[in-house]
Amino acid sequence: MNRIDRLRAALASLEPLELEVRDDSALHAGHAGAASGGGHYMVKIVSPRFEGLRLVMRHRLVYDAVHAMMQGEIHALAITALAPSEA
């Protein structure tokens, strides 16, 4: 399973109605994070779990879901986390 598939699998715990994962690592070639092997990813996720939560709590849920990957596979993660009422 590649990293994007593992990211999708990890984020499935948030019961997304919509999930977009993009590898932006090529845009950061030569960056220190790229040298360490960690990739740069963008995640857009729409989940009912975000309803009524502030942005910082939404991001915390996403980071908690992918925590194991943050130890080396992910150097940077750009997150757009929306409730269904905002999508």
Image (cartoon, helix red, strand yellow):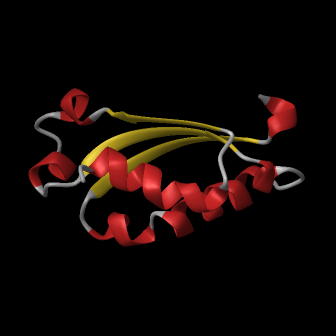
Residue drawn at the location 82% of the way across and 31% of the way down: 86
In the displayed structure, does residue 87 sit left or right of residue 8?
right
Front-lying residue, 31 or 7: 7
| Residue 12 point in image, percent of width and height | 56, 55
User: From the image, which quarter does the C terminus lie in?
Assistant: top right
Front-lying residue, 58 or 10: 10
Q: In this view, does 39 lie above or below 56?
A: above
In the displayed structure, does residue 3 sit left or right of residue 57?
left
Residue drawn at the location 24% of the way across and 49% of the way down: 2
Front-lying residue, 59 or 4: 4
Front-lying residue, 62 or 30: 62
Residue drawn at the location 14% of the way across and 34% of the way down: 29
Q: How many marks?
A: 0
| Residue 10 point in image, percent of width and height | 47, 60
Residue drawn at the location 24% of the way across and 53% of the way down: 1
In the displayed structure, does residue 33 sit left or right of residue 11?
left
